Each structure stands twice: as C-alpha cells, then as structure tokens.
Image: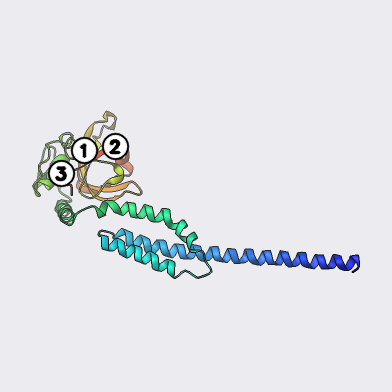
Amino acid sequence: MSVRKATNVCIIKIKRVILQRKTTQRVKTQNIMKIRNLLTIFLLAAGMLTVGAQTPSKQNAHKSAHAKLLANAKSGMDKSVIKDFVKQEVIKREAAATSQDKIGSETGMMLNDLLTEAHKHIGKKYRSGSKGPNAFDCSGFAGYVYRQFGYTLGASSRDQYTQGESVDAKDLRKGDLVFFTGRNSRSGSVGHVGIVVTADNEKGTFTFIHASTSKGVRIDSNTGYYEHRYIGAKRIINN
C-alpha cells in the first residue's frame, strides 16, 4: 500500500471516529432532555401529592405514584439517575408536609374551627384593653378566640408569651400564636400577638390574623412591616 493511500485510509478512519463521537454526544443530549422533561412531570405530580398529605394512606399513594412514574421511564434511560436527581427535592417536600401529618384528626378539626371563629371577627375595630366580642386589642382577640374552645390565655401579649410550647419558625402550623415587638421595635420586648392562619415552612413565611391598632381585625403576612418585629411563637393546642 502506498503512503498516500495509507494516509487516505487513516483520514477516513479518523472522520468515522469523529462522526461516531458526534452521534453519541447527540444521543446523550437527547436523553438528558428526556430526563429533564420527565423530572418536571414528576415534580409537579409530587408537589400535588405532598401538599395534601395528611394520612399514611396518602403517603402510600405518593410512593405508589413515584414508582409508576419510574416504571414508565423509557428503557434507554438510566432510572437510577432520575432517582438521585429528585431525591433531595422529594425529601424537602415531604418534610414540609410532616408537621401537617402529625396533627391528629380531632386536633386538626379544632384548629380549623378556631380559625373559622377568628375569621368571623375580621373588620371589627381595635380598642385598647378590649376583650371582645365587639372590639379587641391584640391579646384580647387571641384570648377571646381561644376561650371559645376552653383555653385561657393571659391578659397581655407578654403574659401569653409565657404560655404553651415554644415553636421554631420553621415548624409553625395553623393556630400557633406568633409574637412581635410593639410599634417601638427597638425595645425588643413582646408587644403584639396574632394567630397563624397559614405557614409555608419551606420558605419561612406565614400569614396571621390579629387585631391591628390601625385597621382592626385583619390578616397580614410576616413579610414586610412585621418581618423585623418577629420574636417567636408558642403552641397552645398540642396533639
């Protein structure tokens, strides 16, 4: 074989190798896109299942749905890659639902009724020292609502802060009491109280119903004005 012919053969072989590598890379890229699409579908399904997770049966349904999604993955895709990729996200979502799972059925019903009672008073005026039912101050409102369910709270927000079980801001649930400084936030002492309506523990945000000095009974968020005034939380109704 001449040198020129041998050189041409080598060039052809090199071109074939390059083409094969390009083809392999293209297939890998397509598989990655397929994995990402499947992951998006899975996370949406996982999100819908975990938000409503309240009982072991619903947790089993979550696991069953997870298994079905993996079983339906195309044979050419590595299922172990999918499992590893979604593992941390699933753990976070299930952890966020854990606090809700721990609420007993009777406790959950009482907390729902407590918030229903609290909502009945939205729009009522703030009046210092008033304990309801026609007007409230912040501690008077919390005390009035809880009293309808057999719980006696202290007369002031400072007194109420000494009651119940301390709760971390990442473990809040509906019905918990949340405490803030008074309007003079520099004092650092308890001066305001509200009742948690909803809590997103993953994001660290919550809404609460309270008797506002300027607008009466209303629902606010812990973001903005109240963010830097937050002091802590207490749980009065345990499982």
Tell me the crowding category of disc 2: few under 14, some 14 to 19, or many 20 or more residues within 10 angstroms, Cα based: many
Residue that badge 3 annotates: 142
* Residue under label 2: 229
- Pick whichever, 68 or 218, lies toward us: 68
Where residue 198 appears, as percent x and y from the top left, is: 26, 51
Q: Is label 1 in contact with label 2 (beta carbons under 8 Å)?
A: yes
Query: Quick one: which residue is furthest to the front in this view?
Result: 1
Q: Amino acid at mark 1?
A: His
The answer to whether residue 133 is seen in the rendering is: no
Among the two numbered marks 1 and 2 on one chain, the one whose residue lies closer to the N terminus = 1
Q: Amino acid at mark 2?
A: Arg
Q: Measured along the vertical axis of the image, is residue 5 above or below residue 168?
A: below
Name the element at disc 3.
helix
Q: Residue at x 18, y 55 (%)?
A: 112
**Quarter of the rendering containing residue 194:** top left
The kind of secondary structure element at disc 2 is: helix
Residue reaching furthest to the right: 2
Instruction: Determine which quarter of the picture holds residue 232.
Output: top left
